[in-house]
Image (spheres, rainbow, N blue to C red):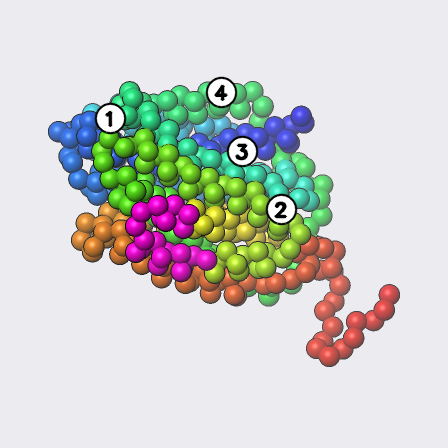
Amino acid sequence: MDAAARQIWFVNAAHVFTHYGLLILATAVLAMVLQEPGLFGTDYGPILALGTGMFVLYGLGSLPMGWLAERFGRPAMMAGFFIGSGAALVLTGFAPGPYWLAAGLALMGAFSAIYHPIGTAMLVDAAGPKVGAAVGVNGVFGNLGVALAPVVTAFVAAWIGWRWAFVIPGVLSIGFGLLYLREGPEDVARNKAAGKPFPEIPRAVVRRAVVVLLSLAAVSGFIFNAFTLLLPKLMAERLANSPDLLPVVGLLAFLVTICGGMTQFTVGRLIDRHTLKRVFLPLACIQMPGFLLLSTLQGWMVLPVAGLMAAAIFGQVTVNETMTARYVAPALRTRLYSIRFFVGFLGAAAASPLIAWLHATAGGLGTVLVVLASFAAVTFVCALAFPDRKEELAPELWAKPVPPKGQAVPAE
């Protein structure tokens, strides 16, 4: 395995830790109200809201990552991600009260902000021509973190306590960071990308793609984070509402989320053979009716519908991340990823407090899911507006002039 391939594997591992760490609290809270009610209280909403700082810093922190990568190098930033976020998780596990818990989570969010702008740019640079497949596999790893977080947290919290649900993944992340340091400071992904020419794309097409991408970022960030945060509570309220069934709640959330992971693998291969819009549009069509249906469903029918929603939401992530690779030159990718993830994570940061407030004051999960349906309508509009250009699959065609309407293309 060459250095570029090893770097891809470390980026994939970092994707697991990023999403896993961000979602520990969503399930741990179900154990905290039972195991330490005197310290944290017995209400779901206020404890979940302690994660607000984590998501705020996760979003705000992504903005300067392009500048920091130029100053310190992308490999050094990735090592900082593994070790810093791991240490923050360990500190969170030893939190003596709510404020310390919120501070530990916020620190973890700040270090986790490194991954998406830096790691995604490194992945795309190292992937070669089959960027869709590489992004799809990377998405599977990220959603493995999303899927494992509720089930592993639930079992660990039930067996040895909620604190170990933070400490164990923190120690593992630090271990991966120490291994990554052995790779050295050379940015092999950037070196590989430097040898590949990037086509000259018309500015109007790039502007359209970037406007849609940034508009989509805010909406999809909110939807993705809200859906993953809601899953354990959705399973608990609709399928397993006994405190003794916490491990079952985690397992059900895992089954739903794994549907999303498998979809990203498939979508990654589809976008290497079809234009992005043709893959994106069907995924966008599913989301609004799916949320409306989930707002009223009870019992076991929640599982297949939630699984379909996970497939649409997570599959769309692969499309979104490939948009930048298809329409933005390598020299500008890290900066655009920083801006895009900053915008997206602002939406994601709003998910935790908004869910907590709506659940407490506006009628529970049904109302939250209806609100998500309205955001999904914006996603559908963005899918309609995105360019549909065959040049995505054959970049050499960008260099050929487009004839005016009605004029035939001269034969070669």
> Given the image, on which type of amino acid does mark 1 rest?
Ala
Q: In front: 412, or 228?
A: 228
Mark closer to the chain start, 3 or 1 = 3
101 displayed left or right of 328:
left
User: Percent x, y for residue 235?
Assistant: 31, 42
393 displayed left or right of 72:
right
Label 2 to label 1: alpha-carbon separation: 43 Å
Crowd rating for badge 2 (residues with CA inside 10 Å; few <14, some 14–19, many 20+): some
> Given the image, on which type of amino acid does mark 4 rest?
Leu
1 versus 19 height, above or below: above
362 displayed left or right of 272:
left
Farthest-out residue, front: 300
User: Percent x, y for residue 368?
Assistant: 29, 54
Residue wearing tag 2: 269
> Given the image, on which type of amino acid does mark 2 rest?
Arg
Question: Pointers 3 and 1 in contact (CB under 8 A)?
Answer: no
| Magenta residue span | 286-306
> Given the image, on which type of amino acid does mark 3 rest?
Val
Mark closer to the chain start, 1 or 4 = 1
Label 1 to label 4: alpha-carbon separation: 25 Å
412 versus 50 height, above or below: below
Mark 1, secondary structure of its residue: loop
User: Percent x, y for residue 274?
Assistant: 64, 55
Q: Nearer the viewer, mark 4 or mark 3?
A: 3
Residue wearing tag 4: 178
